[in-house]
Each structure stands twice: as structure tokens, then as C-alpha cells.
Image: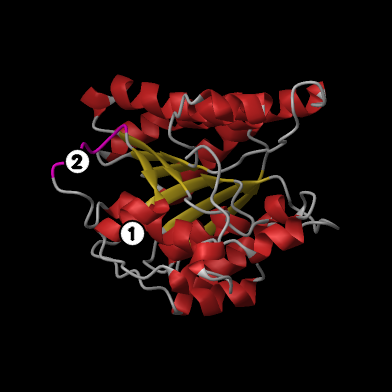
Amino acid sequence: MTSSNDAVHAAATPYRASGTLNGKTVLISGGSRGIGLAIAVRAARDGANIVLMAKTGEPHPKLAGTVHTAAREVVGAGGQALPLVGDVRRDEDVARAVEAAVKRFGGIDVVINNASAIDLSRTADVDMKKYDLMQDINVRGTFLLSKLALPALRASGQGHILTLSPPLNLDPAWAGKHLAYTMAKYGMSLTTLGLAEELKADGIRVNSLWPCTLIDTAAIRNMPHGAVMARAARGPQIMADAAHAILTGGNLAAGAAPSGNFYTDEQVLAAAGVQDFRPYSLGAPEDQLVPDIFL
């Protein structure tokens, strides 16, 4: 989606927040476009401080936006922005991002593990460089960013790690369809499961969020038949609203555990009072939207 479309779509959102991220510092990986940028802009509308770590520092021929254009959108939405060109595969880049966030804003309240790589090839066809890329970005990158941010999250007193990864659905169908990608995404989800348990005593909440339908992103559009798939998807704003509801604790199910949850966007927003999801669609009727995988 273009930035102008994001702005128009956000104006029509049916979600009504009951909490705010005003004054919170959010460190997000891969926030230069798509879902990551939508989450960042939604938080910025509250007056949050957004630290954007992404690889794209210069315009890319196939990908719209850079970390610097994303920062301008964040500021335009009402937040403060710190754009950082960095790669979650590089220990020094992640350490530098955490250090810069603490130095600029005094701490970190939220870490969002959004950076991810996708390749749906079957085992015989997957290139091992792509396999390594998915493991390094999805699993290792999520683990590394979460690990290095722990001291700041503990100091926050209200720390939260939110990872964009699916429920751990062990139906063999998902491993059988695209084993390499399934292992990479489930590695992210195992990080949520493990950290939620490990960090109970620290008061750091750790949760995952996953969409019920395809979301229109550059990753989808760059896949074979991506343009067709995108027409049967929702816009990234549904994930931004759902992330906001999780991070503010707004209207989530009474009595639910604060940590270790694998939420879907529809589940979260329904609990927040959203009854009509059609405004999040990009034009396709609800019954023609393509379900996302792993559900």
C-alpha cells in the first residue's frame, strides 16, 4: 500500500482505543514499510517514541519506502522518530539500535519483532541461502533483538515484546506445505512461548500476533501472482490496530493471561468491540478474502 492509502484507510478504522502509548518508546525491526510501518504510525498517533530499525536506507527499485521516509510518516502522525539503518542478522547493528534507543529516549518499553523473510518453496526446491536467510532473520533476529533489549525492558517496569508470528499449530499440513518457512516462523513463536515463561518474574509481557487473512505487503506483491493475491487481502491497518490493542491492554478478554498468548488480529479486535471488519478490506468481499496460513 502507498502511504496515502494508509492514511485514508486509517481514517476509516472501526477500532476505538481504550488505552494509549503516549510517551512509550517502541523499538521495531523492519519498520520501513507494510505492517511494521502501520504499527509504528498507529503508535505515533498516541505520541509514542518510535525507533525504526530497517535495512533500507536508500530507495530500493522493487520496494517502496526507506527507514527515513518511514520516520517522516511517524513524525507526521504525531510521534518522535529515530531511524536506524541496520540488519537484525548483525549483532552489532542490533546492539547499536538498543543503545541508541536508550540514549535518545531514556529506555525501551516495547520491542516489536516484525522483520521476517518468506520463501514458500518445498524442500526439494528451496535454496539453502534462502533457508539460512529465513533462519537468520526470523528466528535468530527475533531472539537477538529480544535478548539485547531485556535490560531496558526490565527497567521499564511495563516491558512488552510483541512478535509477528503464528500460533504453534502442529497440524502436519503446515510443515508439509513449506517446511523451511514453517520452521522459521515457528522458531519465532517458540521464542514467544519460551520468553513468556522465562520472564514471568520480571513482569515483561511476551505475546505473538498473526493475521487471519492475507495482508497487502511488499512480500505478498513480490510473490508469484502477488498482485492478484493482494486484491484478496486486507490492509496493514488491521494489524496495526490489533497490535495497539494488545500493547495497551485495551479490552482484551477478561481473565486472560497477560503473557504467552498467540493472538489473531480478528480475535483481538473483536474483544475490543470491532464487529465489522469490512473497512479493513481493500475491496474484496469478506467471503472472498484469502485466509492466511498456519490457522
The answer, for residue 90, to whether it is visible in the render is: no
Residue kind at label 1, given as amino acid type? Leu
For label 2, the residue is: 256
In this rendering, the answer to whether 111 lies above or below 168 is: below
> Circles 1 and 2: CB distance less than 8 Å?
no
Q: In screen coordinates, is 110 left or right of 250?
A: right
Q: Secondary structure at mark 1?
A: helix
Crowd around label 2: few <14 · some 14–19 · many ≥20 (10 Å): few
Q: Residue at x 41, y 67 (%)?
A: 277
Q: In screen coordinates, is 160 left or right of 42?
A: left
Q: Residue at x 68, y 38 (%)?
A: 118
Residue, far right: 61
Marked residue nearer the N-terminal end (1 or 2): 2
C-alpha separation, residue under disc 1 versus residue under disc 2 = 15 Å
Q: Residue at x 30, y 59 (%)?
A: 270
Residue 263 location, quadrant: top left
In this picture, which residue range is highlighted in magenta?
Answer: 255-260
Residue 175 location, quadrant: top right
On the image, the x and y values in percent for residue 93 come to 64, 34
For label 1, the residue is: 269
Residue kind at label 2, given as amino acid type? Ala
In this rendering, the answer to whether 261 lies above or below 84 is: above
The answer, for residue 26, to whether it is visible in the render is: yes
